[in-house]
Image (cartoon, rainbow, N blue to C red):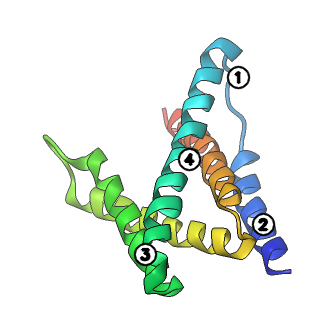
């Protein structure tokens, strides 16, 4: 029952992002490589963070592994902000939100007993999150 509830909550979260507005359709030759790239990011981050890091830390206890692997996951997202003209608050916000997502992804993986559910969830959020970001930026022009 808990796994069905987790999947339902995840589906509601994702679907609200999908049907939040309308945007210009891109030709399949332009959109498809971007979608494949974003799906790859979600899958690879989950395999590394939940499969490798969480898996290695699990022998210290599931809760500690969730917290530590989520912190590592968040810190891995600081690379976007390193370099010339970086903004400390944007970096802080991204690291904290990535760590919170990492904790949610751990909960999904533990609840469903499958890394693939969290990987698909993450990959789907990569695609829909970028779509939503582009939609918002296009509407402010």
- Sequence-wise first label, 1 or 2: 2
Q: Position of residue 80 (x, y in %)?
A: 30, 45
Is 75 situated left or right of 120 in this image? left
Question: SS for tag 4?
Answer: helix
> Which residue does the image show at 13% across and 40% down from the upper left?
84
Label tally:
4
Between the C-alphas of marks 1 and 4, the distance is 23 Å
Residue 33 drawn above or below residue 73: above
Residue 13 versus residue 139: which sits nearer the camera?
Answer: 13
**Which residue corresponds to mark 2?**
7
- Sequence-wise first label, 2 or 3: 2
Question: SS for tag 3?
Answer: helix
Is 3 situated left or right of 50 in this image? right
- Sequence-wise first label, 4 or 3: 4
The outermost residue toward the left is 84
**Which residue corresponds to mark 4?**
42
**Which residue corresponds to mark 3?**
57
Is 125 situated left or right of 4 in this image? left
Q: Are marks 2 and 4 in contact (CB under 8 Å)?
A: no
Q: Quadrant of the N terminus?
A: bottom right
């Amino acid at each position: 029952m808990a796994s069905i509830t987790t999947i339902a909550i995840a589906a509601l979260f994702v679907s609200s992002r999908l049907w939040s507005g309308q945007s210009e359709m891109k030709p399949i030759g332009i959109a498809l490589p971007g979608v494949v790239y974003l799906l790859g990011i979600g899958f690879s981050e989950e395999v590394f963070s939940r499969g490798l890091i969480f898996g290695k830390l699990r022998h210290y206890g599931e809760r500690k592994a969730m917290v530590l692997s989520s912190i590592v996951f968040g810190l891995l997202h600081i690379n976007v902000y390193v370099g010339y003209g970086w903004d400390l608050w944007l970096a802080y916000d991204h690291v904290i939100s990535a760590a919170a997502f990492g904790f949610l992804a751990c909960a999904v993986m533990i609840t469903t007993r499958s890394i693939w559910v969290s990987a698909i969830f993450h990959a789907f959020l990569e695609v829909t999150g970028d779509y939503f970001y582009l939609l918002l930026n296009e509407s402010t022009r």
